[in-house]
Image (cartoon, rainbow, N blue to C red):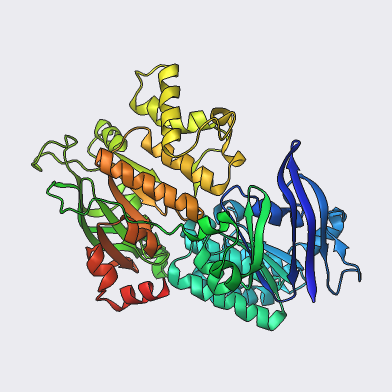
Amino acid sequence: MKLLEVRDLQVAFGGKTVVHGVSFDIQQGEKLALVGESGSGKTVTALSLLRLSGAKLMGSAKLFGAQASPDGLELLSSSEQTLRGIRGRDIAMIFQEPMTALNPVLTIGDQIVEVLTNQGVPKAQAWQEALGWLKDTGIPEPERRMKAYPHQLSGGQRQRAMIAMALAGKPKLLLADEPTTALDVSLRAQILELLNDLQCKHGMAVLIITHDLNLVRRFAQRVVVMEQGRVVEQGAVTEVFAQPQHPYTRQLLDSEPVRDVLDEPSQAIPLLQTKNLRVTYPIPLPGFRGWFKPGEFAAVKSASLSLPRGRTLGVVGESGSGKSTLALAVLGLQAFSGQLQFSASDSTTNTNTNTNTWGQSQAADLALRRRVQVVFQDPFSSLSPRMTVEALVGEGLLVHDRELNVAQRQARVIEALAEVGMDEAQFPGLLQRYPHEFSGGQRQRLAIARALIVRPELLVLDEPTSALDVTIQKQVLQLLQRLQRERGLSYLLITHDVAVIRAMAHEVMVMKDGQVVESGSWQVVLDAPQHPYTRSLLASA
């Protein structure tokens, strides 16, 4: 039976139409994928079904079911009171960026419990049910995570908490906007199995918005392909993927990352070295012992690495394995013990007599900040919403190149934006726009330009392509590869995407529960893994 019918949906912001006549159906218990590049209108289409986009809507979106009229409930013209009864109960949504969607002042448990208590579940029972949903998402130590705040979880753990919130209402239709973007490869399969199980139990349909074509192959039954706000192709996944009719669909399917790096052995001295690096956090101990002495949680245990100039070290592992914590220590943003050293800033020096580390002096730290830049996992939370593109991208110049005048700074900003594929021709008024005016992939390109503008020697890339669609991912990886060849940049690449590691890394380090379980050249680790955990990761990918 038909659950949702969308006909000639049009979405406009300020008189500009961004979605043009989109039509599709969703049957009860069906899995439909909405695929396209960032900015193609996928997320806006899904948000408009619940009138969350804040845009002018035209067309029709009818919901069928027990609480709807025989002819369907028209979502686009229903009252706000009616929609409040639909949201979360009949139609739930998993948002793309969990850090901005979760309440920062409530624990994860309280936020899931709130969904259940709003449906009349007693609070004591709601806590146990919420814990069960969190366990189903595969999050480690669910009892402890229930009492944690969003900022205390990794990106993947926050995404799993949001999935638990959405599923707790047992909706008839789940709108999943990139639900596995922040998850490692092994947990993607687990989440997809969870969604499949829920469909069997509750007859739930899923509209999944994604740029992960492998996910579409494994999960969806039908696919709708969007380009620039229009549906260009739709049909059964097997048919569309086997014989794509539209050139844009063929372009998407031909966008796997390509390896294009210099693989010659490096003779340069290491730019970055660590030995027995350890990062710990205090945790309360149970009972009276906690009154006198805190416990200790080791997020990184004795990590040693060496990264030469012009090379890429890929750090791979599941969410919570310590990858991002290691990156924060390298950036000097997290206290650590053990050795961490950067070589002399003069790349022509072939000796290691002059080394630097964090905390020697304020002036030394400032000099290191220029040499070491970062691209964070979540561009929406790392970019200030109050700053224009020109101010965001050029902010580093105010610190590291104070002698530049306004015109020179603007020229450098335009140059950096052009390097990541953004210009005034494509985005009119680009320099005066704000982050919220861009899609997730476009915001990530802004974050990369912001890091490149001070011309660093080392880039710490924390899941740099996790928010990008496949075509833009390929372009960004090609950009990073070109910059490495031309400038001799070094990359510390933190990711759970094995395809990205295979395309970019020279050396690979595998982490699990804060420990390095395997390391070596990319060919050895990826093609002949020795550790069972590495083999399981590669099998999941």
Q: Looking at the picture, how far across and down is residue 378, in whole percent?
A: 49, 50
Q: Nearer the viewer, residue 126 or 23?
A: 23
- Residue, far bottom: 201
Q: Is residue 130 left or right of residue 502?
A: right
Locate the N terminus and report the quarter of the image it occupies: bottom right
Horizontally, is 198 left or right of 455 in the view? right
199, 33: nearer the viewer: 33
Numbered label tally:
0
Residue 456 placement (x, y as % from top left): 30, 37
Q: Is residue 200 left or right of residue 210?
A: right
Q: Closer to the camera, 282 or 432?
A: 432
345 above or below 342? above
Which residue is rendered at x = 52% and y = 48% of the image? 441
Q: Relative to residue 334, is residue 495 depicted above or below?
A: below
Q: Quadrant of residue 171?
A: bottom right
Identify the residue at horizontal 67%, vertical 69% (top origin).
206
Q: From where the camera sits, is residue 331 visible?
A: yes
Image coordinates of residue 348 in percent, x first then y, are: 13, 36
Examine the image and state in which quarter residue 49 appears: bottom right
> In the rendered image, which quarter contains the C terminus?
bottom left
**Figure check: 312 above or below 285:** above
Q: Is any part of residue 153 visible from this angle?
A: no
Q: Is residue 202 left or right of residue 417?
A: right
Q: Residue at x 70, y 54 (%)?
A: 45
Residue 390 at what x, y percent from top left? 50, 29
Nearer to the camera, 25 or 397: 25
